Image: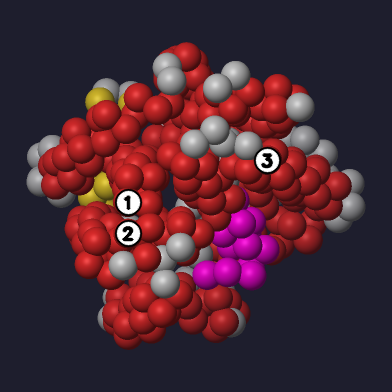
Amino acid sequence: MIRNIRINLFTVSVILMCIGIIMIYSSSSIYAWERYKDGFFFLKRHLVFMLIGALLTFIFMAIDYRKLRSIVQPLILISILLLVLVLIPGIGREVSGARRWFRFKMLSFQPSEFANLAVIIYISDFIARKGNLIKTFLKGFLPPMFLLGVFSILILIQPDLGTTVALGLVVITMLFVAGVRPAYILSLILSSIPLLYVLIFSVPYRRARIMAFINPWLDPRGSGFQIIQSQIALGSGGIFGVGLGHSRQKLFYLPAAHTDFIFSIIGEELGLLGTIGVIILFIIFIQQGIKIIKNAPDKFGYFLSLGLVLMISFRAIVNIGVSCGMLPTKGLPLPFISYGGSSFIFDMVSVGILVNIARTGEYP
């Protein structure tokens, strides 16, 4: 039974990645030719990321996931160091006012993605070690909140509010499932609301995103442009789509068509049936992930798989919600499908760890 679960999870992930390869080329080829005189520019880079991700995936599948507990502290220290270095001019790469990437010739690396994985591993190990102490404030709740605070500040400075919110929700959910008192979590959420309000409405582009979400037609050529073009793409596809490769919105109408809004291009070219198919695949992924969580052989494996499934699920829900106009723009890629480099590699590594946990549960 468990063998079937890990096979199903791996198969669904591969299908989603294959859809990603097709849609990345379809959505980016014209833009890539116009800008780089190479229609395969983004596809070739994506395939390089896939090769790197495949190598790391098989490494994480081969090594016992429980050995990650022995390198938790180095992972956290390296993550903090990378998040600090990326903020230094000349070291980190700045794009549109954000300093989130390291650039190595044709490859880029986003340290916040590595930090996500490191924090999830740390929290899983922390919960497994603390036992019933996790219910106390000083020894169970405060230490992970302090760590989350440090990482949140470093990621917010980049700035990257979407990743910060995603990581915070994953960590809080993990702690809630572990048995942290709901009163502590509720107090944290209530105290965070004023800070979140300031972070959103004190920054012009974030405030514009919220206003565009409420009514994109207030500024159809400015802050509401992406949402409007995304909805036009989804609406133009109808039930069966306009045909693979025949999207009109990718012709310089819809920004980030191969990254944040690739779901909209799927809807335009493959129609309602295509989008429903992708959603069903993610539902199956989550369903199989939940089965792996339930069958995890130990507490560390249980919370590690929980954190990984939560992160991928949250990203998928947010990306699809943003494309449909149901959520404000966050800039989170669609797992396994979007062109994304570091985030795509993180998704593949997560699958490797999940398969590892499932296999260990089958043969403890």
- Which x, y percent locates residue 113? 36, 42
Mark 3 vs 2, N-terminal side: 2
Where's the N terminus, which quadrant? top right
The residue at the point 10 percent across, 45 percent down is: 89
- Which x, y percent locates residue 193? 37, 82
> Which element type, helix, strand or loop, lies under badge 3?
helix
Q: Would you say 29 lies left or right of 241 here?
A: left
Seen as rendered, the residue at the extreme right is: 239
**Dot 3 surroundings within 10 Å: few (below 14), some, or many (20 or more)?**
some
Q: Which residue is mark 1?
A: 130
Q: Which residue is mark 2?
A: 133
Mark 1 vs 3, N-terminal side: 1
* Residues at marks 2 and 1 touching, judged by CB atoms closer than 8 Å: yes
- Which x, y percent locates residue 330? 47, 61
* Residues at marks 1 and 3 touching, judged by CB atoms closer than 8 Å: no
* Dot in front, 3 or 2: 2
Question: 218 or 239, which is in the foreground?
Answer: 239
- Which x, y percent locates residue 43? 53, 25
Give the numbered dot on residue 291.
3
Segment colored magenta: 316-328
- Identity of the amino acid at label 3? Lys
> Which element type, helix, strand or loop, lies under badge 1?
helix
Question: 52 or 274, which is in the foreground?
Answer: 52
Q: Whole-Å distance between the Cαs marked 1 and 3?
A: 25 Å
